[in-house]
């Protein structure tokens, strides 16, 4: 893992968080990335949430000579490989968000919509899913391609699907007026580049979900973007949508790329709309999978998803991170024919987009990954210690 392998190809204004060892066990620092180095801006902005609420954000985030300490070269904060070298005893990169709740948009692509309908009908059984995919995939394509959510065309499709016993709660949020916006992970729980990502031991059907993640300030303004992996347990959610929390929110089940790229003259919302995401999975069993996700195929505009997340109906004073959804729902058989794809421990997952960089993680069981112990309480303790007189 090298700086060139994880950074955007065209530079940009990048901010994030880094773990620094210290006499009190270490602490996270708010950092800016410039000229191949990591610069500490914590004395000016105690949290990323605070920074993202600042006016003239891209200017304020730039390192200031003589004021912001250079912590080291970016290469010094990277592990040699995913899943290694993230000890609290050495510097490393964290997920770039902190106090912001992490929300996610569900069923925003036709491909993922079809798979959600299929996994629900199969009750989470991947063997049954293969037969259902053959039976209803073409009809769903015909009825739902290029449909605008909340439109008269969508209402007509709903009526036909209901009459033919194909209606699903997933179709409601995919083509109805209201998007699915759910809580993916609590503040401070996301893991960053090189970390292990978690699946439950009891899950037999699961997958990564490569997504663009928007950084949104308290006013509902989109101020930056990054990449994320919305690790998903398809068998749990397929058994019941009420198990969404169990399927989505587990130890290390949310990964976010190490930097937020701030909106400025070189990067903005239109770049998000035009982005392509590449997914690569490599297993120790020799299995390889490659897929592309195109944001142009999203059914709801990112700005609409933001409006449905934050506004007069719901405020986030610390801002919010919003996953935009994924068109990736792998059906490629890995083991037995008809069983589709599922993760195995030690899979290495890479998610990349040229203007946002690369997120690389290694799959492990949730209970075998280091426990999440550093939360908001610990952050507040450190803030008090920094304010205390010497």
Image (cartoon, rainbow, N blue to C red):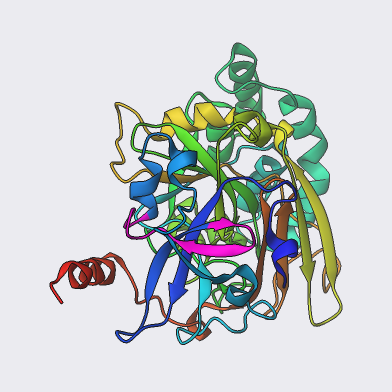
Nearer to me, 295 or 222: 222
Nearer to me, 88 or 125: 88
Q: Residue furthest left?
A: 389
Nearer to me, 208 or 205: 208
Q: Quadrant of the N terminus?
A: bottom right
Horizontal placement of 60 versus 195: left or right?
left
Horizontal placement of 269 versus 369: left or right?
right
Nearer to me, 151 or 11: 11
Q: Compared with residue 113, is residue 35 higher up or lower down, i.e. above or below? A: below
Measuring from the top left, give residue 146's x and y in whole percent.
73, 23
Measuring from the top left, give residue 172's x and y in whole percent.
54, 32
What count of labels does the image hold? 0
Name the residue rendered at 58%, 15% in the picture.
151
Name the residue rendered at 63%, 47% in the picture.
116
Q: Residue furthest top?
A: 152
Is residue 366 part of the magenta span, yes or no?
no
Q: Residue furthest front?
A: 66
Tell me where the magenta segment starts and ends, as one range: 33-47
Name the residue rendered at 83%, 47% in the picture.
134
Horizontal placement of 110 versus 77: left or right?
right
Measuring from the top left, give residue 284's x and y in whole percent.
79, 82
Horizontal placement of 121 versus 372: left or right?
right
Q: Main secondary structure of the magenta part?
A: loop
Q: Compared with residue 225, is residue 239 higher up or lower down, i.e. above or below? A: below
């Amino acid at each position: 893992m090298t700086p060139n392998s994880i950074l955007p190809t065209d530079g940009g204004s990048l901010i994030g968080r880094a773990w620094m060892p210290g006499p009190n066990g270490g602490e996270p620092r708010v950092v800016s990335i410039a000229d191949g180095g990591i610069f500490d801006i914590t004395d000016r902005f105690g949290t990323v949430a605070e920074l993202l609420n600042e006016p003239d954000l891209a200017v304020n985030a730039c390192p200031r000579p003589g004021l912001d300490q250079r912590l080291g070269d970016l290469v010094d904060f990277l592990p040699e490989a995913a899943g290694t070298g993230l000890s609290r005893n050495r510097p490393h990169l964290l997920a770039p968000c902190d106090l912001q709740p992490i929300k996610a948009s569900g069923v925003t692509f036709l491909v993922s919509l079809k798979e959600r309908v299929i996994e629900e009908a199969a009750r989470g059984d991947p063997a049954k899913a293969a037969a259902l995919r053959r039976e209803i995939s073409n009809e769903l394509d015909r009825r739902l391609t290029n449909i605008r959510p909340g439109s008269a065309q969508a209402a007509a499709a709903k009526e036909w699907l209901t009459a033919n016993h194909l209606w699903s709660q997933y179709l409601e949020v995919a083509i109805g007026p209201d998007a699915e916006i759910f809580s993916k992970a609590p503040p401070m729980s996301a893991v960053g580049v090189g970390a292990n990502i978690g699946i439950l031991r009891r899950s037999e059907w699961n997958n990564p979900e490569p997504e663009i993640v928007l950084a949104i300030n308290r006013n509902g303004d989109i101020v930056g973007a990054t990449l994320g992996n919305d690790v998903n347990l398809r068998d749990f959610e397929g058994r019941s949508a009420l198990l969404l929390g169990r399927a989505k929110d587990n130890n290390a089940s949310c990964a976010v790329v190490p930097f937020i790229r701030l909106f400025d003259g070189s990067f903005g919302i239109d770049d998000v709309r035009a982005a392509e995401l590449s997914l690569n999975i490599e297993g120790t069993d020799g299995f390889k999978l490659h897929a592309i996700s195109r944001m142009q195929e999203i059914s709801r505009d990112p700005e609409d998803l933001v409006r449905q997340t934050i506004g007069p109906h719901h405020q986030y004073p610390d801002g919010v991170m919003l996953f935009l959804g994924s068109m990736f729902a792998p059906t490629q058989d890995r083991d037995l024919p008809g069983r589709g794809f599922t993760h195995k421990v030690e899979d290495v997952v890479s998610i990349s987009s040229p203007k946002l960089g690369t997120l690389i993680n290694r799959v492990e069981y949730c209970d075998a990954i280091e426990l999440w112990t550093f939360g908001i309480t610990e952050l507040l303790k450190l803030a008090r210690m920094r304010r205390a007189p010497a």
